[in-house]
Amino acid sequence: MMLGSDFGRSFYYLGIPPAKIFIGEIVLVLVFVFRPRELCDRWTSFLIRPSAFGPFAWCLLFSILYGVFEVVYGLSAGYSLLTALQNLVFNIYPIYFFLGVWAGRDYPTLFQKIIRYWAWTLAIYGPAYLLFLHSVKLTMPGADTPVFSQPGGGGLIILVLLALERKPSRFWLPMVVSAIMMLAIQVRAEWLGMLVALLIWGLLEQKMTKVLSIAALVTALLVVGFAADVDLPSPAERGGSISTREIVARGLSAIDPALAQEYTDSRNTAFYAGTISWRTRWWNAIWNSVNESQSKMLIGNGYGFPLGNLVPYLRNTDIRTPHNIFFFALGYSGWTGVVLFVALQLSILGMLWRVYRTTGQSIGLAVCAASLIGAFFGNSLESPIGAIPYYLMMGLIIGPALCSKFAMPPRQLAHRQIAEIGVASQPAFAGTTSIASIL
């Protein structure tokens, strides 16, 4: 599921598009049917037994129950059942965290291996997409989503390879391609997210030298592109073109559109700035809609509400998300929904901090920060392409470090106890910390 992010939205549209049933929902149903104990028993044990996972388990339970309430509320108001259920997945997708914990507990290096495959896949698919695949006019059966969608995750790949690989130089090619893709796709939220993530990782682990090397790599790519006068047509969904000037102009347009015009023409500047202004006007309309009465402040407009109808330019369209997770939660579920979402994310941050204090690795905190920043400026945690990889990654990172003994199957627990007895008989054990003592 994480590797599917290399291929953009198209991978997550595998399924039955006319019925709005996609691979993300299908996987969860299959797990509940064929491996219910791996989810239900673990979730239940986290609820009733004190552990580091308890706050997340309770927050998720309340979030799902509240989501069901919002569906009922929306249906009672006459909204579409299908749209209401599409909103409900926002509360459902965090269940993937348990799948990540399950996989990470049994295969502690799985996250690192997935990133390696992700890196090499992007190194092949990314350039192919920019050169010719973006112009192929094929769509997923039953949907208007292109078969070849824009790839993503370049910044995340660079960060994880530098943080976890003993010899990251072995992956110089996919890291260079990842940096090129991160610049070429021109998603400003990803740029900001990766900047914050790199600073978190560099400061917490005292790796600022490597952070500066990444900055030097990006700067070198921009300088080479400027010197070579590289100017490639950009994919239609991004607008503009791929060049150093256009990349700089897109970044500046979010701060000072007038200054951005020094690097591109006024038409492109207006387009770049327009991708921000249509969102901010919608956000303002959502804010006013929710805060117009006490009942809406508390529970929002309900799942299924046509949120786009709050602004004239989105009326009667299929756009359901304001590209900001705060206003998504506020618009549909009010301040109660916002509080539940924030509580869920704080429970994840608490576990990640515990992992950092235990292992010294801050990669989880960095990835979480980048993902949340992206969610506040794009369509992320309310959609499968962002939510599923995010919660899976959090589980894969947290699971190996914080899984307690009661969450282990009996045979594995027996092997762990034997290993601990064997290690405890050696003098070196005196300076180590067991997982049980962590929890």
Image (cartoon, rainbow, N blue to C red):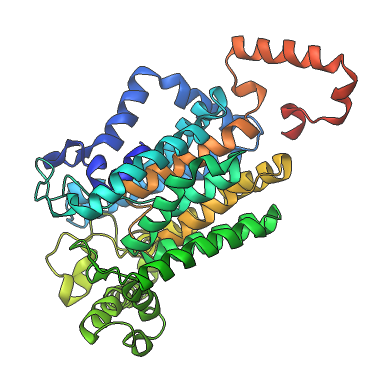
Q: At x 56% / y 38%, what residue is drawn? A: 397
Q: Is residue 438 left or right of residue 243?
A: right
Query: Residue 7's image quarter?
Result: top left
The answer to which of 99 and 134 lies nearer the viewer is 134
Q: At x 57% / y 47%, what residue is drawn? A: 162
Q: Quadrant of the C terminus?
A: top right
Q: Is residue 414 left or right of residue 386?
A: right
The answer to which of 170 and 292 lies nearer the viewer is 170
Q: At x 31% / y 24%, what residue is drawn? A: 30
The answer to which of 48 and 360 lies nearer the viewer is 360
Question: Residue 108, image x and y in percent?
Answer: 57, 28
Question: Residue 34, image x and y in percent?
Answer: 35, 17
User: Vertically, is 70 above or below 268?
Assistant: above
Question: Residue 384, image x and y in percent?
Answer: 32, 45
Question: Residue 206, image x and y in percent?
Answer: 71, 55
User: Vertically, is 103 above or below 95?
Assistant: above
The answer to whether one can see residue 293 in this image is: no
Query: Residue 117's image quarter?
Result: top left
Q: Quadrant of the N terminus?
A: top left
Q: Residue furthest front?
A: 228
The answer to whether one can see residue 253 in this image is: yes
Q: Residue furthest bottom?
A: 258
Q: Is residue 103 left or right of residue 166?
A: left
The answer to which of 51 and 384 lies nearer the viewer is 384
Q: How many marks?
A: 0
Q: At x 21% / y 67%, what residue is drawn? A: 308
